Amino acid sequence: MQPNKESLLQAVDDAVRMAARTLVRTARHGALALVDAMEYGPSVSRVGLATDTDGMPLFPNSSLSGRIEAMTRDGRAALLLGEPGRGDPLAHPRLSLTGTVRRLAGETHARCRRRYLERHPKASLYIDFPDFSLWRFEIASAAYVQGFGKAYALDRADLETRCADWPEWHAMEAGAIAHMNLDHRDATRLYATRLCGADDGDWRITGLDPEGIDLASGDDHRRYTYPAPLARAEELRPRLIELAGEARQQAAMDRVRHSGHSENEPGIP
Amino acid sequence: MQPNKESLLQAVDDAVRMAARTLVRTARHGALALVDAMEYGPSVSRVGLATDTDGMPLFPNSSLSGRIEAMTRDGRAALLLGEPGRGDPLAHPRLSLTGTVRRLAGETHARCRRRYLERHPKASLYIDFPDFSLWRFEIASAAYVQGFGKAYALDRADLETRCADWPEWHAMEAGAIAHMNLDHRDATRLYATRLCGADDGDWRITGLDPEGIDLASGDDHRRYTYPAPLARAEELRPRLIELAGEARQQAAMDRVRHSGHSENEPGIP
């Protein structure tokens, strides 16, 4: 639900923006609401989710379950993200996005298809079927409800990742992900376990953008956000090396703390 | 998304009806889609869920997060139910309901408030706040997607529980639940573990209707559906006694099977 202006909205700060962005980047699925173009009746369906590099949600649709083109007026749509954990479902964070959907083609389709498959490898079984199309959700505004009495009104700028040179970034991203996942699985694991506090697992990178790293191990999806965003693609490599160093140092210090000595510990170079 | 008539819909049978009904009865939360009465823009938000005795979904709304009255045209709404488990979120069952919402008052409000609190005890902290209202979703039609290529179009009759005398049933339900939860926790536990295949836990009954028993232990919600529905309220007591006998017999047979003998087993009367 959109908060109305008279309601008890809280002021938006960087911590709220980061929590909302992390929710968008890690959501595996969402509820997509559309309004029938003919009769203005609402419908809602589950969509699988990934994000484009700039943080806009991506989802596939099969025309067998309804042609989106016929189910929306001017492309208008809403998207609910967030999975309740234990206890009262209203006590858990969720994000209601409002905006428009557009069907992807060409270069954008190729990039978004690749990014969707990085997050949902099993979708390779059907994503190229003729009834499937890939869509991008253009966020216009959002309501972020963190829990009881904690509601925030966000706009697109609060959720969008910016970059000085997207073509340069897009020319580099796929190769950088492949390189990290092939040759630096140890560093990738440390990003997840040391920088995101995740359990050990078969961690791989699923997305790289100027603001952070998306990681997955099975159904566990995590996001590491850099303290300061990268200005250009060329800053990525030194940043990843630096982060791996920091994560290794943290791991080493943890071992010292737990064992009382650091020498002859396996795994510390 | 509503299935269109040209799509590859499957024929609806009793097993599909039962799976869809069980999903409605056990859903803890859903995504409610509305269409703005002024500009026809869609919105979607999370709602906590219970059901009325006839199987129609119930949910509370706080006017602080938006007044539903202003967010829907002619009360029209859609509701998505179902939680994806592991793996591809599109491989898991979900139900897209289409219908209208109406705000509850009087006797219906009292009954639905009680049933909502049986399923969400912590909602007693806020359900009577002046900004909270309770709503009932009148199902008109539904799309049940059980997984890839398994989609069904349902109507209200496929999901509605009927009763020859609702006033008689409603006069009895609350007392029967209280009696079972106070004096027959052992039978309630057997309904959950023996008839629904649930793990042992602090099981209690959260709802009784002519078609079955709703049960909960923490966040685990289960539904037992009678092989044949009850025609009248007076049939409930003998049916519950009979079921407890069946469940005890199953438990005893399992013990015989596992131990090779049945005598001197604790817990078998």
Image (cartoon, coloured by chain):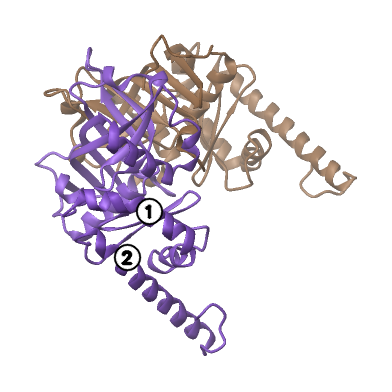
Chain colours: A purple, B brown
The answer to whether residue B99 is left or right of residue A127 is: left
Residues at marks 2 and 1, CA–CA distance in whole angstroms: 12 Å
**Could you tell me which residue is drawn at 21 percent across and 26 percent down?**
A75
In front of the other: A206 or B199: A206
Of all residues, the one furthest to the left in this rendering is A6
N-terminal label among 2 and 1: 1
Residue type marked 1: Gly
Badge 1 crowding class, 10 Å Cα cut-off, few under 14, some 14 to 19, many 20 or more, is few
Quadrant of the image occupied by residue B6: top left
**Local secondary structure at mark 2:** helix
Q: Quadrant of the N terminus of chain A?
A: top left
The answer to whether residue B244 is left or right of residue B45 is: right
**Could you tell me which residue is drawn at 50 percent across and 50 percent down?**
A218
Do the residues at pointers 2 and 1 share their chain? Answer: yes
**Could you tell me which residue is drawn at 21 percent across and 36 percent down?**
A98
**Local secondary structure at mark 1:** helix
Residue topped by disc 2: A237
Residue type marked 2: Arg
Vertically, is B159 above or below A232? above
In front of the other: A6 or A51: A51
Residue topped by disc 1: A175
